[in-house]
Amino acid sequence: MKDPDCIFCKIAAGEIPAMKVCEDDAALAFMDIGPLAEGHVLLVPKTHAETLDGMSAEQAAAVLRHLPALVGAVKAATGCEGVNVLQNNGRVAHQVVPHVHFHIIPRNSGDEFHFNWPAGEYPPGRAERLAESIRDNLSG
Ligand code: 5GP
Ligand code: ZN
């Protein structure tokens, strides 16, 4: 399924160009046009889904199976020290292109990419209640 207004659907269909690095029936990986570091690659499903929870487990598995090799190839090609795999869902989570994509971002000490990671703490009982609710939603 393709969204006619979606830029990544158009790339997946070959309607607009991209620098491809691997491809099969389910997935496509290509160079990010605005790299956070040299070698920044995007991995996308060929079927349109806006966010990860809109994909079936089978569709997701068919895309994610490419990640280990891609991470290894990006490391080998760039000589980077580490790699972040990022996947944003929703504008509030910094998703700009509303078609599921995984960022594969080479990392080196002293690079310009910084996380704000404000780790918090649960009040007593809160984590248990949330875990129960998540379990219920998984089984429901
Ligand atoms: P997001 O913020 O949605 O997680 O990331 C979208 C990514 O898509 C950005 O890193 C941006 O540079 C990349 N991008 C947006 N439009 C294009 C395009 O037309 N071609 C390619 N190759 N990358 C794109
Ligand atoms: Zn799309």
Image (tube, rainbow, N blue to C red):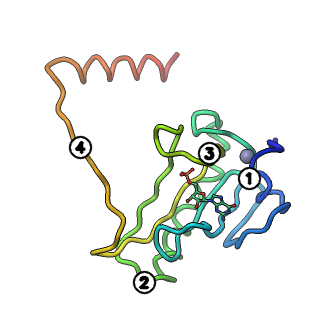
Q: Amino acid at mark 3?
A: Ala
Above or below, comparing residue 26 to residue 122 in the picture: below
Dot 1, crowdedness within 10 Å: few (<14), some or many (≥20)?
some
Q: Position of residue 99 (x, y in %)?
A: 66, 45
Of callouts 4 and 2, which one flags the residue occurring earlier in the amino acid sequence? Answer: 2
Disc 4 on helix, strand or loop?
loop
Which residue position is annotated with label 2?
79
Q: Residue furthest left?
A: 124
Separation of marks 1 and 2 at Cα, in angstroms: 30 Å
Of callouts 3 and 4, which one flags the residue occurring earlier in the amino acid sequence? Answer: 3
Dot 4, crowdedness within 10 Å: few (<14), some or many (≥20)?
few
Dot 3, crowdedness within 10 Å: few (<14), some or many (≥20)?
some
Please tell me the numbered disc located at residue 60: 3
Given this view, does label 4 or label 2 mark the residue nearer the observer? Answer: 4
Query: Image quadrant of residue 102?
Result: bottom right
Disc 2 on helix, strand or loop?
loop
Q: Is mark 1 within 8 Å of ligand 1?
A: yes
Q: Residue at x 63, y 53 (%)?
A: 63
Of callouts 4 and 1, which one flags the residue occurring earlier in the amino acid sequence? Answer: 1
Disc 3 on helix, strand or loop?
helix
For the N terminus, give its image quadrant.
top right
Q: Residue at x 41, y 67 (%)?
A: 83
Given this view, does label 3 or label 2 mark the residue nearer the observer? Answer: 2
Given this view, does label 3 or label 4 mark the residue nearer the observer? Answer: 4
Q: Which one is in front, 86 or 112?
A: 112
Q: Amino acid at mark 1?
A: Ile
Dot 2, crowdedness within 10 Å: few (<14), some or many (≥20)?
few
